[in-house]
Amino acid sequence: MALGDSIEARSLVRCAALAFAFSIAAHAAAGESVDEAQARQLFDQGRELADKGDWPEACRKFSAAHALHSTGGTALQAANCYEHIAQSDKAIEMYQYILDHRATEKNAERVSIAEERIAALKKPAPAFPPSSAPASASPVPPPATSSEPSSAPDASTSPNRVPAYVSFGIGGAGVVVGAIFGVLALSQASTATKDCKPDGRCPASEADDASAAKTKGWVSTIGFGVGVVGVATGIILLATGGKGSKSAAVSPHGMSFKF
């Protein structure tokens, strides 16, 4: 470093020291103590830094000013600065200082601000944001639509198998009756026709047996017919699940069903 540069640097330091000394002297002349004067300078520096957006460094200046000469003004400015850098505990501490000294605080508005900010900072945060649900909550299943089959049994849609069983019973009875009367008809017809001539003429004494055999044959035919219809209807009813309206009726011409 050149000799001229060294002399110039020392001159600047002396000037700065003299300026600081004159500033302290001026404040002292105005009735301020040395600590008050230094605190005011730190406070002014903090405001300049805050205006530039350098909040962390501004907070250090405001805190140092408050430590040297504590007032409601330094406490309020430091608290506001700490809120900007999300240090709520330190902000509450500064606001609390104002409340603790409310009796000597000349600015009532500072007390009101401190009360409001402490209440806001101490207010518990909601467990979950209003616009979102808890992350651990189980999703609610969507309601079943009409197009989705239900697994629960429904009495109104369960198949009615009683008509099918009735049809099988009637059909079975018809088959049994047809078989019995068929055997009887064959036996009686065989007895009635044993004395008949080759040309088909039969003695008058066998006419009653022949007529009875014919009647039994008709009964056997009707019985088998009812049996076949009953069994077929039962199968149809089981296949369709017993749905629809059904009725059955027995007449001399057989059994009739309506669906």
Image: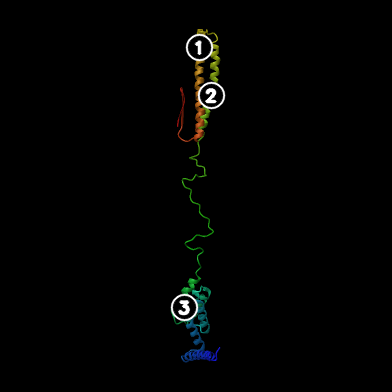
Disc 2 packing (10 Å; few <14; some 14–19; many ≥20): many
User: Disc number at residue 175?
Assistant: 2
Percent position of residue 96, x then y? 50, 77
Spatial distance from mark 2 to mark 1, Cα to Cα?
A: 26 Å
N-terminal label among 2 and 1: 2
What kind of residue is marked 2? Val
**Residue drawn at x 50%, y 15% as measured from the top left:** 214
**Badge 3 or badge 1: first in the primary sequence:** 3
Q: CA distance from mark 2 to mark 3?
A: 110 Å
Circle 2 SS class: helix
Residue 123's mark? none
Mark 1: secondary structure: helix
Residue 126, image x and y in percent? 50, 65
Q: Height in image: 248 above or below 63?
A: above
- Disc sitting over residue 52 in the figure: 3
Of residues 88 and 96, which is closer to you in this image? 88
- Give the position of the C terminus as an image quadrant: top left
Is residue 115 in view from this perspective? yes
Q: Is residue 42 above or below residue 118?
A: below
Numbered tag placed on residue 208 in the rendering: 1
Q: Earlier in the sequence, mark 2 or mark 3?
A: 3
Q: Residue at x 49, y 74 (%)?
A: 84
Q: Residue at x 50, y 25 (%)?
A: 226
Closer-to-camera residue (14/169):
14
Check disc 3: other Cα within 10 Å, few if <14, some if 14-19, many if 20+: few
- The spot of residue 144 in percent (x, y) is 48, 48
Q: Residue furthest front?
A: 2
Callout 3–callout 1 Cβ contact below 8 Å: no
Q: Secondary structure at mark 3?
A: helix
